[in-house]
Amino acid sequence: MKTSFQVDNQFLSAALKNELAQNAESQTPENNWLTKIRSYSYADFLKQNLPTRKVEHWKYNELFFLTQAEFSSSPLASRTQSEISDLTLALKNAFTVVFINGQYSPQHSSDLIDSHVSATPFSQANTKQIELITSSLSSAQQSTNLLIQLNTSLSQDGLLIEVESNKKIGKPIYLFHLNTSADENQICANQTLVSCGTGSECQLIEHFVSEKCEATQLALQQSVVHLQENSQCNHYRLNLEASTSMQVSRALFLLEKDSSLNSFYYSEGSQLNKTDIDIHHRGKNSESNLTGIYLPSETQCIDYHTNIEHQIANCTSREVFRGIIADSAKATFNGKIHIFKDAQKSDAQLSNKNLLLTNQAEINTKPELEIYADDVVCAHGATVAKIDDKAIYYMQTRGINETRAKKILSIGFINELLDKVENEALSHYLKDQVQICLSDIK
Amino acid sequence: MLKIKNLQVKVEDKTILKGLSLDIKPGEVHAIMGPNGSGKSTLGYVLSGREGYEVSGGSATLNGDNLLELDADERAKKGLFLAFQYPVEIPGVSNMEFLKASVDTVRDYQGKEALSTVDFMKLAREKCKAVNLDPNFLKRGVNEGFSGGEKKRSEIMQMMLLEPSLCILDETDSGLDIDALQVVADGVNACRDENRAFIIVTHYQRLLDYIVPDKVHVLSDGKIIKSGGKELALELEEKGYSWIEKA
Ligand SMILES: Nc1ncnc2c1ncn2[C@@H]1O[C@H](COP(=O)(O)OP(=O)(O)OP(=O)(O)O)[C@@H](O)[C@H]1O
Ligand SMILES: [Mg+2]
């Protein structure tokens, strides 16, 4: 496999390159701050073009297509409410926020009046909100993932979602992303910032789908969730795009003092899903609990790079990811735990288990520890296994055929993770989805 | 019911069964005894359809069906049951889910009516009690963390649920305490009827006090070298195997 190659902006269409260059030069007085962020990001993106040691980040990935294809900007597309409703999850009573090709679509989104939740496009942010956005985004700038830099440069706007302080939001906040079909390769960008106010509690569901088409849809996306002091967030991120889709995205969580995050990931279906997950424990006694399931099949490729930073003392992190890799699919799991020098009494645990269903299926799993404090508890482990022939035979002697046995064993492999989904409607949905996804096992 | 003629079996090019014949009629209980490594478990594996066991000669039929060309699950559906010497642990798959899938397929194959979840639960709990297993075992992973004796009792519980016509019990008595031995024997005896046959593999005559066999066979080096009535077990207990092997 090729371990390094040069990614430059050649994969962007002339019109897109032109737009980015113009943005870098323009200095319109209004939204100046946004223009600035975009142009800085573009400059960073261009700087990173050289194959540096950071290229390792892409090592196991299928971004090679970037040297061979050309992408133009996603067109503005509209869909009827019923077309949208056909694709959204049947959640009871959710605050729905719809994005089509990365663009916020207020007409399909819920009315948030009196909900203690607000949605504000960056372009309409007031001074205080701009401060919040710029400070959160500056933490996001440190990404080593050049496509995330590109995402920021391409995002003409962004959406800020604020959860009011000291409010417990009963209904889930449901962020629904649709990528529409296209005749030629298209790229879209989205950036969303969620601020969970001090002492607030909320449920956040991010759901990504796409329409199948002949061309390739490349979706860039970044979500930044800022958990203010003592806030709690139950987060779910579901990638269920069509097989023509590629998503390169990042989810960044900033955890302030005494905040608590549960974050659940599920991925299947798309040609490529590369998600970087960054958890920054910035305030003492903050807790994070990550769970992930990835089920690539056919020639799909799923890549999770997780990076848990214990920047300060007394924080706890838990991370459990499991993957079932079928056919000639590939998965990469890279789990890094980074414990800063003064982060004493950190407690971090990471586990990654993989089940390979065929000889062609491929997994690259790599836990990484960087520990600079001495008084810490840190445990990590990764395993790769094939389906257990003895267990299959045992089940066969009880009348269960081989295909069914494999399916039961596969579901058994991820069952306990699915049980962590607290939202009932979502839990039912995912349990059915897993059955469907694994129904082709031979 | 079960007819085995001159069965020869190889594992990884090593011949293990060297011409074994056995004829079991409905309602009969046959005990098979014999030294370690003589091929007792191999017989159970090859009859139940485990992969990697190459039949190089002979035949085995169950109620007229050629067992040897069926997949393992087909054999189970046709009424063959093997209680394992070492049952496999399957973490993550609940016993309840596993047993339901098993009972559903076997009943479906046999043209019996499907059980509702409620009826199935009731039945499963009842069978648990019959072998003195806490019904909470149904919620645990299949054999996951079960003690040796619990695994064996769980095998008998499965047998009771599936109501097979031919039951092969491979050292189900090993590792059982005295009370559990009684429980397992009671379970087996409760299943005995004129249509069901048993092969009981054991090293100890004691089990055969509880489950009285119609015939006792000695398997040594892949062949049955002696057959007799229940008294043969007592004789073996007393004298060991060498007197027959030498003869
Ligand atoms: N995969 C294998 N490769 C090589 N030899 C094998 C394999 N499986 C079994 N054998 C051998 O076959 C012989 C018979 O084994 P088997 O398990 O049938 O014995 P057994 O009569 O059940 O013994 P025990 O009383 O100890 O349970 C043994 O010598 C064993 O080592
Ligand atoms: Mg044995």
Image: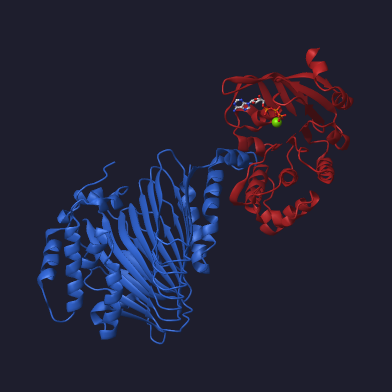
Q: Chain A is shown in which shade?
A: blue
Picture quadrant of residue A246:
bottom left
Q: Residue furthest bottom?
A: A114
Q: Which quadrant does ligand 1 occupy?
A: top right
Tell me which colouring the rendered structure shows.
by chain
Q: Is residue A103 left or right of A11 when viewed as pictured?
A: right
Q: Position of residue A231 (x, y in %)?
A: 45, 77
Q: Residue furthest top?
A: B247
Relative to B74, is B122 above or below?
Answer: below
Q: Is residue A86 left or right of A3 when viewed as pictured?
A: right
Q: Position of residue B4 (x, y in %)?
A: 71, 23
Q: Residue at x 75, y 35 (%)?
A: B171
Q: Position of residue A273 (x, y in %)?
A: 34, 55
Q: What chain is the red one?
A: B
Picture quadrant of residue A337:
bottom left
Residue nearest the observer in this picture, A298 or B172: B172
- Which quadrant is the N terminus of chain A positioned in? top left
Residue nearest the observer in this picture, A374 or B38: A374
Counting every numbered tag in the picture gives 0
Q: Residue at x 12, y 59 (%)?
A: A14
Q: Is residue B214 left or right of A52 when viewed as pictured?
A: right
| Residue A79 visible (yes or no) | no
| Residue A144 visible (yes or no) | yes
Relative to B171, is A69 above or below?
Answer: below
Q: Is residue B82 left or right of A421 when viewed as pictured?
A: right
